[in-house]
Amino acid sequence: PIIRRADYVPPAWRVPEVALDFMLDADETWVRATLSVVRADSGAGMPLALDGGGQKLVSLRVDGVPATWRTDGDRILIDLPGNAHRIETECVIHPATNTQLMGLYASGGLLCTQCEAEGFRRITFFPDRPDILSRYTVRMEADRATYPVLLANGDRINGGDLPGGRHWAQWRDPFPKPSYLFALVAGDLAVNRDRFITRSGRGVDLGIWVREGDLPRTGHAMAALKASMAWDERVYGREYDLSVFNIVAVADFNFGAMENKGLNIFNSRYILADPETATDADYDAVAGVVAHEYFHNWSGNRVTCRDWFQLSLKEGFTVFRDQQFSADQGSAAVKRIEDVRLLRAAQFPEDGGPLAHPVRPDSYIEISNFYTATVYNKGAELIRMMATMLGWDRFRRGCDLYFDRHDGQAVTCEDFVRAIEEGGEADLSRFRLWYSQAGTPRVTATLDHHGTAATLRLTQSLAATPGQPVKQPMPIPLRVALFGAETGRRLGEERLIVLEDAAAEIPFEGLAERPVLSINRGFSAPVIVETTRPAADLALLSAHDDDPFARYEALQQLMLDTILADLQGRIDHAPVIAAMRDVLGDAARDPAFVAEAVLPPSEAFVGDHLPAIDPEAVHAARERLRAAIGGALVDDWRGLHDRLKAGAYELTPAAKGGRRLRTIALSYMFAAGAADAAARAWAQFEAADNMTDRQGALAALASSDAAERPRALAAFYDRYRGDALVIDKWFSTQALSTRPDTLRAVIALAAHPDFTLANPNRVRALIGAFAANQRAFHQADGQGYRFVADMILALDPINPQTAARMVPPFGRWRRFDPDRATLMTAELNRILAVPGLSRDVFEQVSKSLA
Ligand code: ZN
């Protein structure tokens, strides 16, 4: 069935209080729930509807008396005579066989929960929708030896030992919350404890709970948590509200982490970090996700979503907030480049394909499929555009109004925009189109120069997307500046131009020299800008633009243009090499920026600019560019590889940038065919005192024919066998190899004893990484498609959410040649024909074919 936003009806019954009583056991857990229910204004004559997830209902009482019920699919309906009743249910669930990892499940000896979006109904019968806010009291009882630690939301208010080696604990969360924020954890956990004093002087006990052996790897997450708490006070005026904040790390988790009130549950890869096992990118991801989940306490928990169509209300805003936090912690320019790279890699293809949907979707079959880059990352860009147009102070006043006005409520994206409008004194009426229209706008920009004046001509257009044939122009905020073609100096101030209509002409005056256009600086709008700036102008910007993002962008554009020209038989690498030489001059001053700037656009990004993608040709053209850059500058790369050799390991931005640039230098030496590349890689691998250097060297070798390759892969495996997060890297590094035999290697790895479909991280490491390797996945004989389709079908009965996440690469079939398109749709049809497909996979596959 299709769920539609337009069909929203307010709940007929409210549930102000919930008491839960768990008799915990991995094989069989008993759940007793007592709900106080109150008829809502709109509930006259309506039965109480409780969602279920196929669990067994043992008993049901209304006001203490056994009662009858009707069933409606997985729901039960109860006719109630009065306006306030007490409902008691008793059900049995089986955590150990819950392979979907939704609801209450077992992971490595722990019992834990995941309820967003609709997992709570798999624990107990409940109106499982985010606009029902309840106060929870939770009692848990379990065997004390197996489950010595018992955690739930809020504060622990009671507990103790029981006969027979059992014990119990009771927790109470004073804040009304939707069921998707419920959580409990039981298990043998060690804790890293710390304390945070809020700005109004309240003490908060912080705990990060992990397996005993992982305790030494929790320091970075704890530091990030405290930094996030202080940051949200300072930047948004938001203070934490409970006396306890706990985080638990689990090994089996469907995505990154979950913001349950006072008890965040994390995929262990976003908590655990030490230099030996985590790369610099892992460290950044840990801090970013810890901050994201913490920030949800206000943007998500105190103010939550009315229904799941409003998901971006909390996710877009919270991603924007975690991006701001990370930008403040390290290099803002590099962070912005990373954000945009992710948006272009994950969201632009979504917007341009069959799964395109608005930031606020209109319909879904399975909500789990809408935790997308569009809702999260494009959603964050919408918030950023509002902040750009209003300026920080006005935007912040709008946020204050939003939090004040809606604290304790379940609201909509419209409520957010209205608060920003009123609090920030702005008119966002046309801006709302960004929430409802799918697709990435295209902006064309041409600058005509005449005497000391110039005219900037802008147009915008938005292509049709599924269900949206006709679109309207949207306000597009573009930060624009001009630079002198002779001096490279900026001509006048930067301007913020909001392109409101389909076209506009903007005059510039008083120009002493020919101007070069710098546009969408800082990536002020999530659009594709089309200009016809010659290579010389792009080279000038890449050397002189005073906006680091624009500098990066100019060199990316130059490299993209060069690859696209090569694909049409016109090879000229000289302008890129010259610009690259200039940028390398900054390697000592800002290695992190230089590392970002010298990486050519990905094969997938190049493909997105072609009418029909030939993956082999794209790979070859990009490799020719890499070989040219590597060869022409080989002495520079060699010099960098020598000079950036680290002293003692440090986690400073400069040290991180140095490590990144050093490994990129190494990979350019491979591209150049330098005779000493493999020996250098092996030496870097062997001498490394941190995972960034070691895995960087391994990745360079993994894409090579060097004799050191098998040696390094074996040594890496032996060193880290038993450390799941590092073995994930061993799988993904091989799946991302550019060697022509990657598919064969990946098929062999799927039969490796360490590969399992039961662990989502392992699935993403091998299958997810392989499907993102454009050339390997799109091997002409279609065997890559067949392999991934087989994996989707094998995983669907185990974990449909994670299976469905592997479908989108097939949705790009229209972008390839007819032979590949035929092979891809054949696999989609083969999946669709299998009886008993999950809703998750069915939705993604059927929409991909449509
Ligand atoms: Zn989130």
Image (tube, rainbow, N blue to C red):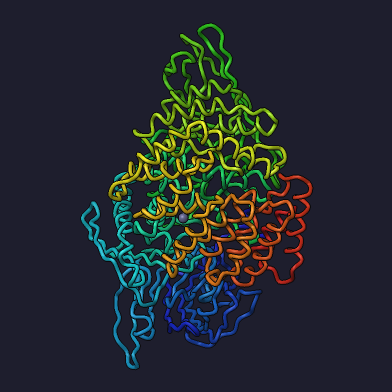
In the rendered view, tell whether residue 564 sits above or below residue 297. Answer: above
Q: How many marks?
A: 0
Q: Position of residue 201 (x, y in %)?
A: 21, 55
Q: Position of residue 254 (x, y in %)?
A: 52, 64
Q: Position of residue 662 (x, y in %)?
A: 41, 43
Q: Is residue 347 left or right of residue 388?
A: right
In the rendered view, tell whether residue 160 sits above or below residue 720. Answer: below
Q: Nearer the viewer, residue 478 or 568?
A: 568
Task: Pick the quarter of the image with the N terminus.
Answer: bottom right
Give the residue at the far bottom of this rendering: 164
Corner quadrant of residue 5: bottom right
Q: Nearer the viewer, residue 676 or 309?
A: 676
Q: Nearer the viewer, residue 441 or 502?
A: 441
Q: Is residue 4 left or right of residue 233?
A: right
Q: Nearer the viewer, residue 156 or 293?
A: 293
Query: Is residue 329 visible in the rendered structure shown here?
Result: no
Q: Position of residue 715 (x, y in %)?
A: 45, 62
Give the residue at the far top of this rendering: 451
Query: Is residue 480 visible in the rendered structure shown here?
Result: yes
Q: Is residue 770 left or right of residue 336?
A: right
- State the residue at coordinates (61%, 67%): 800
Q: Is residue 397 left or right of residue 11?
A: left
